[in-house]
Image (cartoon, rainbow, N blue to C red):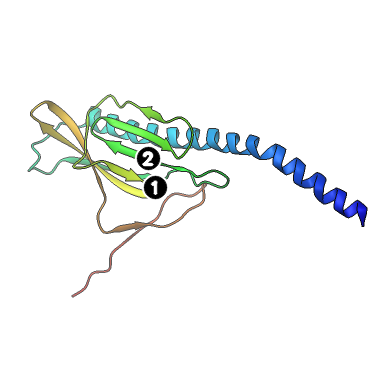
Amino acid sequence: MIRVVLAVALSAALLGASLPAAERAERDRNAVVATNELEELAGTADRLAAENDPVAPAATPATATVVVAPPVPMVTDGGRIVVDDGRLAWVPATGEARSVDPAVRLRTPAPLVVVDRTRLRLALVRTGDGPAVRVRRARRTRVEGRSRGQTARVRTSALVG
């Protein structure tokens, strides 16, 4: 009986000693995964601007769609991805925020806060200050969950009538 109590006490002590290291490792992993997502979004916006000509906001612009997936927390509290005018940032619940600067200017109607897998629509438009990529949430689509080795599947809304 004493051996069982000692084994449980030793296990609890080892778990308590290793938990801070596990939290730090997950925070670092989440920051790297989120930075990769932000770099993919910035790269798509840069390619859209480099390969197309901007048009007036009322005209049909060149577009691209990106699925942004913030890291899923397991031990820590996680965080969120923020897309705002000229700002792409990973803001964790605890720890240091990270940001990525795209070469092209980004415009959003309001700051986009992404906490779950989200489909974003990028459109290259001409503004008074020059070309900019307008970023909005894609409408009427739902992104299904996927494993890291698969591509995202999109299911559109059913048509009525």
Mark 1: secondary structure: loop
| Closer to us: 6 or 142 | 6
Contact between labelled residues 1 and 2, with CB atoms less than 8 Å apart: yes
Q: Which residue is mark 2?
A: 81
Amino acid carrying mark 2 in the image: Ile
116 is higher (above) or lower (below) than 83: below
Label 2 vs label 1: CA separation? Answer: 7 Å
Dot 1: within a 10 Å radius of its alpha carbon, few (fewer than 14), some, or many (20 or more) residues?
some
Side of 156 where 62 appears, left or right = left
Q: Quadrant of the C terminus?
A: bottom left
Amino acid carrying mark 1 in the image: Val
- Residue in the image at 39% along x and 47% along y: 115
- Residue in the image at 11% along x and 26% along y: 129
Q: Indicate the position of residue 149 as horizontal and vertical percent values.
A: 52, 47
Q: Which residue is mark 1?
A: 115
Mark 2: secondary structure: strand
Q: Indicate the position of residue 10 as horizontal and vertical percent values.
A: 82, 44
Q: Indicate the position of residue 11 as horizontal and vertical percent values.
A: 79, 46
Q: Residue furthest bottom?
A: 161
